[in-house]
Amino acid sequence: MKHLLILFFSVCTFSAFSQNDTLELYTQQGCGYCKWTKEVLTKSSIAFSENDLADDILADKMLKRLAAAGYKGTIHLPVIFLNDSLILPAMDTTISLQKIVNILVMKQKNGTLHFAKSKLTIEQLTTATNTANNDCVLRNGEPQYVIIQYEFDDKQQASNKLNELYKQGYTFAGMVQFQAKYRIYSQIFTTEEEANAVLPNVQKKFPVAYVYVIQ
């Protein structure tokens, strides 16, 4: 975490001497976090370029840039580059998307960062409007492992619980539907071993929690 924050603030400090800073997002349709990020940046008049991962060429370019930056974890969206330096996903998953975006807005306001003024309006944003979804993780055929903490029969109740987790700072919470049940999780893991290692701590608060694989 310390390394990432040093890199992030170093980029911000250096950018104070440049004329315009650049912000580049990689997004996909149906990703609520992508939508939220674009809305916050647009409301703050921060210009950004957007790369839709439906384009295989752009997706391949993003994967190469992540590899060059040394990132090997789960790819949570949106992926964000500030002045060609990776700032999200963070090497330390405790650094939330909300924190990164809020820092960008703050740095723009205090003059540390100098972005071109956005000409977009909220109505022009094209990302799907749903925010409680499971489409903010880029999957390349590899399974993802999550720890299910809640199960609901009613989708609205599940969505309400998911929104509660978002407000509590669980950036990577999500919902999956299986056998007429809506299942809520707060974390994503790349291996079953990682999920099982965390499970005992989760079960102290949620005794019925269990590991679930998303194919």
Image (cartoon, rainbow, N blue to C red):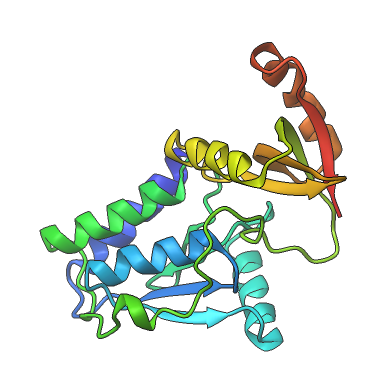
Drawn side of residue 66 relative to residue 104, left or right: right
Q: Where does residue 88 sit, x and y in percent of width and height?
A: 49, 58
At x 60%, y 73%, the residue is 28
Query: Where is the C terminus found, in terms of image quarters?
Result: bottom right
Residue 181 x %, y %: 79, 41
Counting from the top left corner in percent of width and height, residue 122 is at 32, 75
- Image side of residue 27 versus residue 45, left or right: right
Residue 69 versus residue 45: which sits nearer the camera?
45
> What's the residue at 21%, 76% (across, down)?
18
Is 197 left or right of 133, judged from the image as shown?
A: right
Q: Is residue 22 above or below residue 34?
A: below
> Quick check: can you spot residue 174?
yes
- 165 sits to left or right of 68: left
The part of the image, by quadrant, that contains residue 121 is bottom left
Q: Residue at x 40, y 53 (%)?
A: 7
| Residue 6 in sight in this render | no
Give the camera-side residue of 113 and 29: 29
